Each structure stands twice: as C-alpha cells, then as structure tokens.
Image (spheres, grey):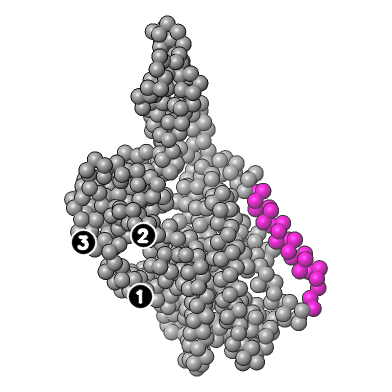
Amino acid sequence: MEAHGNWLMTPLVLLAAAVLAVPLARGLKLGAILGYLVAGVLLGPQVLGLISHPATVLEIGEFGVVLMMFLVGLELEPKRLWAMRRPIFGWGSAQMLGCAALLLAPAFWLDADWHAAVIAALGLAMSSTAVALSTLNEKNLGGTRAGQSVISVALLQDIAAIPVLALVPLLASQGRPAAGQSSAKLWLALGALVAIVLGGRLLMRPLLRWIARSGTPEIFTAASLLLVLSTAMLMQKVGLSMALGAFAAGVLLAESEYRRALEADLEPFKGLLLGMFFIAVGMGLDLAVIWQRPMAVLGLLAALWICKGLVLWMLSRWMDLPRMERPVFVILLAQGGEFGFVVFQLAEQATLLDAAQRSVLVAAVALSLALTPALLAWAQRRAGKETRSSPHALNEQQDSPVIIAGFGRYGQIIGRMLNASGVSATVLDHDADTVESLRRFGWRVFWGDATRLELLRIAGADTAHVLVIAVDDVNHSLKIAEIARQHFPHLTLVARARNVQHYYALRDLGVSLIERETLDSALMSARSVMEKIGWTPHAARQLAWRFRRHSVEQMEQMRPHRGDLDTLIAMSKQGRQQLEDRLAQERRALADGQGGRPWQEPEHPQSDTR
C-alpha cells in the first residue's frame, strides 16, 4: 500500500511522527493537536510523501472520534443528560442556525447559487467535536461551565448531522426527491436509535457481566471495542453519525458497574486513534489550493471566524458564562469541523459544488482546525495576564496550614467550621461566578483550578499540613489527589466522595480520610425518624454510630472484589444480616438493662444530646 510496498511502513512512520512531533509541540506550548496536524502536513503526499493515501488513515482515525464520544457518554448519566436538554437543544440550535444564517448572508450579496451556499454555510457552521473535546481534556477544562457548554453544543451538532446529510440530495434535485425515500430513512434512523436503547438496557450489561465472570481482562477489552464498533457500524448503515451512536451507548452504560473498567480499557485506544485522525487531517490539507488561491482561502477563514465568533460571543453573554471562560467557549466552537469534510464531499458528488469550491472550503476548515490550539493558547496566556492582576487570582505565596479545593455546598461547611475555630485556610475554586458571589459575603476565595501543579505550589502545598478535596467533579477530584500524592507526599488528604465508586478510586490513590457526602446527613435524618417513633436520643445516636462504622468497614471489605458482581451481592447480603443480628443483640441487652423497651421515651424527650 505504501512506500517500498511494506505494510509496516505506515504504522512505523505514524508512530515515529507522533513520538517526535507531539513532545516538541508541547514543549513549545502549542498543544498535542497542533503537533499531530503539523506532522500530518509533513508526512502527506504534498511534502515528504511518506504516506500517499491519507484517506485510509483518516477512516481509521475517525474511530478515535467515535471512542471519544463513547467515553463522553459514560460521564453523562441519563438523568444528567436530561437535565442538559435545554442547553443542548436550545443553545445548540441557536449556535447552529445563527452561524449558518450569518455565513449564508454574503452569498446573497454575491448572487451565488443558493443551493450550494446553504450546504456550504451548514457545513461551516459545524465545529470539530474531536478538537473541542480533546482540547478540553488536554487543558482540563471539561468541568468548567464553558466546557459543559461546548459539550452541549457539540452534541446538538452531532444530532444535526442527520438533517444536514439528508438536505444535500434534496437541494441537488431542486427539491423533487421521492418523499418515500426520505421518510424511510427517517424511520430507519429512529429504529436504529431504539435498538441501541433497548440493547443497552437488555443486552449490554448482562453481556459485560458474563464476560467479566470469565476473569480474562483482555477479553473484556475486546468486548469493549466490539461494543463501540458494532454501535458505530449500525449508525453508519442507517446514515447517522457514528459518534452519535457511540455517545448513546455510553450514556446507557454510565450508571453501570463497569463504567470505570470501560474507561480504563478504551482510553489508550482513543488517544492513539485520535492522533491518527489529526495526522490524517494534516495530510489532507491541500497546500496547492492555499498557494494558488490564498485570498479566497484566507478570506473564507476570516469570514468563518468573524461570523461564528460574533454569534458565539453573543451566546456566551446570553448564557451568562463567566467572563474569563468565554474565550474558551468561542474559540473551540468558532473553528470548522471534520463533519464539514463529509458534507462538502457529498455535495461535490451531488454536483452542488465543483472541485475547486470544495478544495477552498476544505482548506479553510483544515486551517481553522490547525490554528485553533495556538489561538486558544494565546487567549489563555492573555487571560492569565489579566487574572494575575485581578484581586480574585492567587498570585502571592500562601502559608496557611489548610488548603481547601472546591468551595461549594460541601467545602463551605468545612471552611466555616475552620474559620469559627480560628484556623486559617487557603480556598480555591475554579468557578468564577462562585468566587465572585462568595467574596461579596466576605470570604477570601481565590479563582483557580486546583489540578494545576503551579497553583497548588502558590497556595502553599509545600508547607501546608492538610489538603481538603471538596470539588464537585469526580475526575477533578481524582486528578488533584493524584497530583498531591506525587508532588506533595507530606500532605494529609481529606476528600469528599460523591459515591462508592468515587470512594474506591480515591482509596486506590492512597487517600484514607474520605467521607461520602450524603452518608452523615442521611444518618441524621434516620436518627430523627427513630426518635419520632419513640426511640430515645441516646439509643438513636448509638444505632446511627454503629451503622456508620459497619458501613465503612463493609466498603473496605468489598473493595478488593468490586469487579465481581456476584461476590459483591453475596457480601452485601451477609453484611446486612450480620448488622441486623448485632443490633438485635444490643437491643435485647438494652431492653434487659432498662427493664422495658429500648425505644422508651425519656423523662425529658426534648433534651437531645446531639
């Protein structure tokens, strides 16, 4: 296939290019994506010619985008996705239609063919899911409001791929297609989505459970890849976005017990395949068009950024995004997208666009993809200079004995108790709105992301005694714990766990002082219930304390077996029975000692000793 007729040459060249280009690009603070793109340009047929068929690499690399969307879906439970319906369909639709309308306007002034103009505008209105989500992950911005907004808009664009693709043959035939064909395609697409939903509920989890029982990790990895591949192929067969199908499958498994195992197995494949995708995009960049028609390409690139940037900036204001996060939202969505390549190729086949027009459009989109990481790095450096002069930024070395990362509803309680006891703490929170609001109430909170090593150093991690990890986002929490364990081993980590899975992940990182955020509040409510039905405050308190101790002990006992569902169920039933037997014995002993019922009302029931 490739140079010298040796099939090993292609993977050898790709891996060598990635190993050399990406560290160099990161060293220049340009980001890994730009490194991949530049490597692709150099490897392509128009420069060194080491790989002469970039289309093949692109087809393989597109699977990296599919894996990425599956992993994004794993982070969004169905309830959370439903809560995001307004930003997805509201703001996402506003971005798509607003950008397309603004890009379409010059075509009418230039008296261009409106059929071709509509397809070109819709193709340019799409943004790159691969670049946007990879950049969010690389720069750890996924947990910010801007990052969540980018994900919402990207999901709408994947959904919009269906009508945009259907529109190309409609416009090509001047609006005279067979209505039955369009209707059949729509029903086929809906049927495929229903099949994924039902398959996820009825087949995926039992299948993964059966494979996990085999005790062969490599087969579980193969099953993970098979799951994503089959879902993507089903979507492709019915004319839908492969990434959309993979995302739906991920959402359906977001609440399963195999979520973390799937993430761990697929993450390495996602990174490598995404790298191939970006290399292939770089190889497909038509340098001849840029050289022969520079004004057309650069003019279209400028129009793309200006029109989309204007719409996105207005949206960021209407969405009330923090001012410091708006550049991230605008830049990551103002670029063109890889879906545009598909639209323009289909439009050329349908004779809506000629080869020259398609080449100009593709070149402008590819340049926008290549320049986005550098543009975002420049914007962040500029924002860094602004925030360092802001009173909200942490720019002076701190020496408090305690650092609190995250000052939401959980962290504030810890901070208030420390403050009331005369203990000073350095407080960090990455949400600019939260920082602004808390400062109005007199709290000395600093804006910053605690996953940044240099920020932890300025916060005084080298000399502090305790780091409280109270952030909402699970991935951020684990990242902070990992950094602290690696660079500040003397720090005592006190962490908040959102759920049992989060608890186990923190324990795997060596964190021992962990509190599940709802455990104690639930136990306090249980105590109130017990007292209201006649238990004494002392007996209710003792019961809650023993239940708490048993719950923590049982979690530790179950931790080594968390991948074996049958063992977990058996241990859970056994632990529940042991607790019931132990408490029954204590109730009998207490009743014998009181000469009556253990829930007998005290003489002064209002004297609660809590």
- Mark 2–mark 1 Cα distance, whole angstroms, equals 25 Å
Tell me the number on the disc at residue 396: 3
Q: Which mark is residue 436?
A: 2
Estimate the x, y position of residue 513 in percent, counting from the top left.
31, 39
Quadrant of the image for the C terminus? top left
Q: Earlier in the sequence, mark 3 or mark 1?
A: 1
Query: In this rendering, would 161 be left or right of 537?
Result: right
User: Whole-percent x and y of residue 295?
Assistant: 49, 92
Between 457 and 43, the residue placed more toward the observer is 457
Query: Range of the magenta residues?
Result: 176-199
Classed neighbour count for the residue bearing mark 1: other residues with Cα under 10 Å, few (<14), some (14–19), many (≥20): some
Q: Is residue 508 left or right of residue 234?
A: left
Q: Main secondary structure of the magenta part?
A: helix
Residue under pointer 1? 378
Judged from the image, the secondary structure of the residue bearing numbered disc 2 is helix
In the rendered structure, which disc, 2 or 3, sits on the residue that comes first in sequence?
3
Instruction: Measure the alpha-carbon separation of dots 2 and 3.
Output: 19 Å
Q: Residue at x 80, y 71 (%)?
A: 179
Q: Element type at marker 3? A: loop
The residue depicted at 65 percent of the width and 92 percent of the height is 111
Q: Nearer the viewer, residue 317 or 158?
A: 317
| Residue type, numbered disc 1 | Trp
